[in-house]
Each structure stands twice: as structure tokens, then as C-alpha cells.
Amino acid sequence: MLTAKIQKELNSQLNKELFSAYLYMSMAAYFQDVDLLGFANWMNIQVKEELMHAEKFYNFIHERGGRVALEAIEKPLTEWASPLTAFEASLDHEVFITKSINELVNVSLQESDHATGIFLQWFVTEQVEEEANTTEIIKKLKLMKDFPGGLYMIDKELAGRTLVMPATAA
Ligand code: OFO
């Protein structure tokens, strides 16, 4: 059984995961608009991953006898000055999500809800990967900044990203 506090926090994180999907869908649309289809592909895969994150929270709340209560999803930005700016915004968002997951772990400890704590460990690990993946692309974008055709090389590489289903997906 979930305490009211944990249920509220889990629902709030579910909303943040849905916003993540919304934000990355907006970034995918931006990349599509500027004909960077590999970047758009990468972001579209990210959307699917975020929806899986949201689904994990949705399923866990129900599994614990709680009640999912969906809230309004914030409107994301629709334009970025450059691919680098978009990826920097993506990293900022992932850092925000990492902080939010860490705070949720703290709340689960305060409430002595160890089942929620164990559930959240998957997300603690996932956030390391989320930040690393985005940081790697930012590094490449900076490295290739003055190299003619560099952006298209990265675009070609990002076109190859496919959805990897996590073994522990709920
Ligand atoms: Fe991008 O990890 Fe969920 O939000």
C-alpha cells in the first residue's frame, strides 16, 4: 500500500516523464522541420523511451494498490537556435529529472517505503545513461562545429538509433 505522500510524488513523476516525451517530440518536430532526419529519429526513439518510463510509474502505482491521477502536461518549447542548443536543453532537462528521481528516493526512505526505493533504483541507473547519451552528442556537436559537413555526419549516425526494450520493462 502506498502512503498518500508517496502516491502524490509518484503521480508527479509520472507527469514529468510524460512531459519528457512531449519535450522530445517537440524537439523531433524541430529537427524534422530543418531536415535533420537522423536527429529527428534519435529524438523520436527518446519519446518512446520516455513513454516507457511513464508506463513504469503508471503500472507501479496500480501494482501497489494506488490511484493514477493524470495532470495537465506543460507546453514544451517548439524552437531552438541550433541542434546544439536543443541538446543542451535536453541535458538540462535530464539533470532536472535526475534530481527529481533522487528526491523521490529520499522521500521513499523517509516514509520507510523500501519497495518504492527498490523500484526507483532502475531509474537511478537509467538517469546515468540518459545524461551520458546526451552529453556525448553535445561533445560531438561542439567538436564538429567548424568542420564542413560535420552536422550531416552526426545526423547520419543518429539515424541508426533503434529502440532497445529494457529487459526489466514493466
Ligand atoms: Fe529521460 O529519463 Fe525519463 O524523464
Image (cartoon, rainbow, N blue to C red):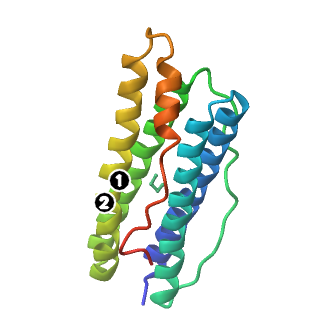
Q: Nearer the viewer, residue 131 or 153?
A: 153
Give residue 78's quadrant in the image: top right
Q: Which of the 4 quarters of the picture holds residue 68?
A: bottom right
Left or right of 116: which side holds 71?
Answer: right
Q: Which mark is residue 34?
A: none
Q: Position of residue 12 (x, y in %)?
A: 53, 64
Q: Quadrant of the N terminus?
A: bottom left
Q: Position of residue 161 (x, y in %)?
A: 48, 48
> Residue 124: which numbered mark, if any?
2
Amino acid carrying mark 2 in the image: Val
* Quadrant of the drawing holding the C terminus: bottom left
Q: Which residue is mark 1?
A: 127
Callout 1: few (<14), some (14-19), or many (20+) C-alpha neighbours within 10 Å? Answer: some
Secondary structure under tag 2 reads helix
Q: Quadrant of residue 79?
A: top right
Which of the two residues, 117 or 149, is positioned nearer the viewer here? 149
Which kind of residue does numbered mark 1 sit on?
Gln
Residue farthest to the right, as pictured: 33
Residue 72 in the image, given as x and y percentages of width and height: 70, 59
Is 30 displayed left or right of 116 in the figure? right
- Residue positioned 44% across, 67% down in the render: 165
Q: In the rendered image of this protein, does residue 151 appear above or below residue 64?
A: above
Determine whether 11 is above or below 77 in the image: below
Mark 2 neighbour density, 10 Å: few (under 14) some (14–19) many (20 or more): some
- Residue drawn at x 53%, y 41% as measured from the top left: 159
Disc 1, SS: helix
Q: Do residues under tags 1 and 2 come within 8 Å of each other at their CB atoms? A: yes
- Residue 26 is situated, as x and y percent measured from the top left of the image, at 67, 42
CB at mark 1 closer than 8 A to ligand 1? yes
The structure residue drawn at horizontal position 31% and vertical position 82%, both measured from the top left corner, is 115
Distance, label 1 to label 2, CA atoms, is 5 Å
